[in-house]
Image (cartoon, rainbow, N blue to C red):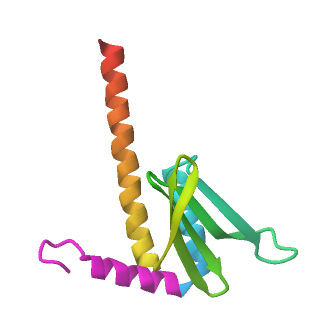
């Protein structure tokens, strides 16, 4: 733990790694559901059935349209693959492969930027309507 009483980045990354390594299918499904609920319209999820006759499925790929990047995490056999692409005017300028904790941290930062931008837009709209 950090001196402030809040967990450090190392603690958070270590906890994430323990959780993800336990059951990657469950981790991906939980992440997909959480992101779909948190930022609807910006998340695309690909799912596969758990078996030929199965009614259940699991997330295999999650794509998030962030503020400045498109983030992709996918389950490939028994490991996670993550990358983000810089998008300008609908064109991908570059793709950066990242380890999963760094990917999650970058996604978190972009989601914060989206929230701040939405808050500013809401304030401008409120001020306009109230004047």
User: Would you say residue 18 sits in the magenta stretch?
Assistant: yes
**Is residue 78 shown left or right of residue 12?**
right
> Farthest residue in the left direction?
3
Give the farthest residue toward the front: 93
Residue depicted at x 53% and y 52%: 37
The magenta segment is 1-21
- For residue 14, above or below residue 124: below
Q: Is residue 30 above or below residue 75?
A: above
| Residue 67 screen position, x and y as percent | 44, 51
Secondary structure mostly taken by the magenta-highlighted segment of the chain: helix
Q: Is residue 3 left or right of residue 37?
A: left
Please indicate whether residue 124 sits to the left or right of residue 68 in the image: left
Q: 56 or 103, which lies in front? A: 103
Relative image position of residue 96 (x, y in whole percent): 49, 72
Residue 75 falls in which quadrant of the image? bottom right
Task: Say how many tags the image has.
Answer: 0
The answer to if 68 sits in the magenta stretch is no
- Quadrant of the frame with the N terminus: bottom left
| Displayed quadrant of residue 116 | top left
Q: Residue at x 40, y 74 (%)?
A: 102
Q: Position of residue 60 (x, y in %)?
A: 66, 72
Above or below 45: residue 83: below
Residue found at the very far right of the displayed protein: 53
* Quadrant location, the C terminus: top left
Q: Residue at x 24, y 77 (%)?
A: 8
């Amino acid at each position: 733990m950090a001196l402030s009483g809040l967990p450090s980045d190392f603690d958070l990354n270590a906890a994430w790694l323990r959780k993800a390594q336990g059951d990657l299918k469950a981790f991906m499904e939980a992440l997909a559901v959480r992101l779909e609920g948190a930022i609807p319209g910006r998340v695309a999820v690909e799912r596969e059935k758990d078996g030929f006759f199965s009614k259940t499925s699991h997330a295999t790929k999650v794509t998030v349209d962030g503020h400045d990047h498109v983030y992709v995490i996918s389950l490939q056999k028994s490991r996670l693959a993550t990358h983000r692409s810089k998008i300008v005017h609908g064109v991908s300028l570059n793709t950066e492969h990242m380890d999963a904790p760094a990917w999650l941290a970058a996604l978190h930062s972009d989601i914060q930027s989206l929230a701040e931008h939405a808050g500013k837009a809401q304030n401008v709209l409120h001020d306009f309507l109230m004047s």
